[in-house]
Amino acid sequence: MGYLQTWWEYLWGKVMNEQPIFEIIQDLFISTEIRDMEVIKKAGIQIVIDLEGSFDKSELGDILKAYLWWPIKDAPKLPDLGELHFISSFAFNFHRNGDKV
């Protein structure tokens, strides 16, 4: 089926050697670390919020409208809720305007 998979397909093991990108709702995606920028190009994603800092946006040229690096660490507590609200509003506003996030 390609790079875009549903949660159901992933949970049942149909994604084997690909880097899956999951479409949570229309035009809103989530993924693990992206190493192949073709995944982003094929999905038409224009806004990226990078939680790890390993995303190489230079490979995408002018495809991205916005890139936000917000590294979070695995910890027993939540990130700052004010920051979390700001980041979610950032993504929501782009998504509401028809961009793929």
Image (cartoon, rainbow, N blue to C red):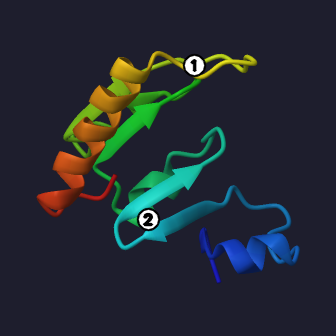
Q: CA distance from mark 1 to mark 2?
A: 27 Å
The residue beneath circle 2 is: 42
Q: Nearer the viewer, residue 82 or 66?
A: 82
The tag on residue 72 is: 1
Query: Is the residue 59 above or below the residue 94 in the image?
Result: above
Left or right of 90? Residue 8 is: right
Question: Mark 2 Cα within 10 Å, few/some/many (few <14, many 20+)?
Answer: few
Horizontal arrangement in the rendering, residue 58 relative to residue 61 (left or right): right
Q: Position of residue 40 (x, y in %)?
A: 45, 53
Say what secondary structure mark 1 lies in.
Answer: loop
Please tell me which residue is depicted at 23% across the width and 35% down the height of the picture: 66
The vertical placement of 6 against 62, above or below, is below
* Residue 69 in which image quadrant: top left
Quarter assignment of residue 12: bottom right
* Residue sitting at the far bottom: 1
Apparent side of residue 79 relative to residue 7 in the rendered image (left or right): left
Q: Nearer the viewer, mark 1 or mark 2?
A: 1
Q: Residue at x 46, y 58 (%)?
A: 29
Q: Where residue 72 sits in the image (x, y, percent)?
A: 57, 19
Badge 1 crowding class, 10 Å Cα cut-off, few under 14, some 14 to 19, many 20 or more, is: few
Residue kind at label 1, given as amino acid type: Ile
The quadrant of the rendering that contains the N terminus is bottom right
Counting from the top left corner in percent of width and height, residue 78 is at 59, 22
Report if residue 41 is visible in the image: yes
Q: Quadrant of residue 27?
A: bottom left
Q: Are marks 1 and 2 in contact (CB under 8 Å)?
A: no
Amino acid found under the numbered disc labelled 2: Lys
- Looking at the picture, does residue 83 appear above or below residue 9? above
Image location (x, y in percent) of residue 31: 60, 50
Q: Earlier in the sequence, mark 1 or mark 2?
A: 2
